[in-house]
Amino acid sequence: MSGIANTPQPPYYAVIFTSLRTDGDDSGYEAMAKKMVVLASQQPGFLGMESAREDTGITVSYWQDLEAIKAWKANSAHQVAQEKGREKWYATFKLRIAKVERDYGL
Amino acid sequence: MSGIANTPQPPYYAVIFTSLRTDGDDSGYEAMAKKMVVLASQQPGFLGMESAREDTGITVSYWQDLEAIKAWKANSAHQVAQEKGREKWYATFKLRIAKVERDYGL
């Protein structure tokens, strides 16, 4: 899923996930990341996702409301991924939950 | 400015700028982007910035409040950059203004 998310009129929520990877296990990480994109996009209230990585990786996912974010965080397959992320794949990360109040574009 | 922004306790604001570049004028674009990072970081209420580009580029800047964002948007040198961005550098973009309500990290 690349490009710019086709989100509805605000308000809605953004989860901004910024991370630095550890070295190694790229294939395990990439496979899990792809699985999680597919799984996230099937969740109720999912509105879209944008992602890019150089050294820093930024993934922004968009959600209808806080309940949708909470349910996705609690998803059991996602919890396995979160655990591996904390233990193995991320040197550090920060996750921010933000309410999108307005937007505009070109 | 790379890595993860060292933002204060929420609430504060995020400006999520997602873009696709046109082809060409990479040197002009890169030079302007660097200038704008330096200039943004000197603005009142600036809290940090995170950036990554593959095909999709994502830059998230963090601000103390909406007034700080408004002042940065109106900055004259930044307005020149915005104009060139619309005319020349971006095939498309979307800018979202969001209030960060909570965060956590590793």
Image: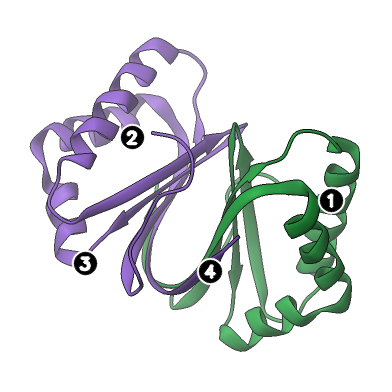
Chain colours: A green, B purple
Q: Which mark is residue B86?
A: 2
What is the distance, in whole Å, between disc 3 and disc 4 at their CAs?
Answer: 20 Å
| Residue B25 visible to the viewer | no
Amino acid type for the residue under numbered disc 4: Tyr
Query: Same chain for the residues at labels 2 and 3, yes or no?
Result: yes
Q: Are marks 2 and 1 in contact (CB under 8 Å)?
A: no
| Percent x, y of residue B12 | 31, 68
Closer mark to the observer between disc 2 and disc 3: 3
Q: Give the crowd class for mark 1: few <14, some 14-19, many >=20 residues within 10 Å.
A: few
| Percent x, y of residue A7 | 55, 65
Identify the element where label 2 is drawn. helix
- In this view, B78 is above or below A40: above
**Closest to the observer, B22 or A82:** A82
The answer to which of marks 3 and 4 sits earlier in the sequence is 3
Closer mark to the observer between disc 2 and disc 1: 1
The residue that disc 1 covers is A34
The answer to which of marks 2 and 3 sits earlier in the sequence is 3
Residue under the image location 70 percent in, 49 percent down: A90
Q: How many marks?
A: 4
- In this view, B68 is above or below A11: above
The residue that disc 4 covers is B104
Amino acid type for the residue under numbered disc 3: Asp
- Quadrant location of residue A37? bottom right
Q: Which mark is residue B65?
A: 3
**Closest to the observer, A65 or B44:** B44
Residue under the image location 9 percent in, 37 percent down: B76
Quadrant holding the C terminus of chain A: top left
Amino acid type for the residue under numbered disc 1: Lys
Identify the element where label 4 is drawn. strand
Identify the element where label 3 is drawn. loop
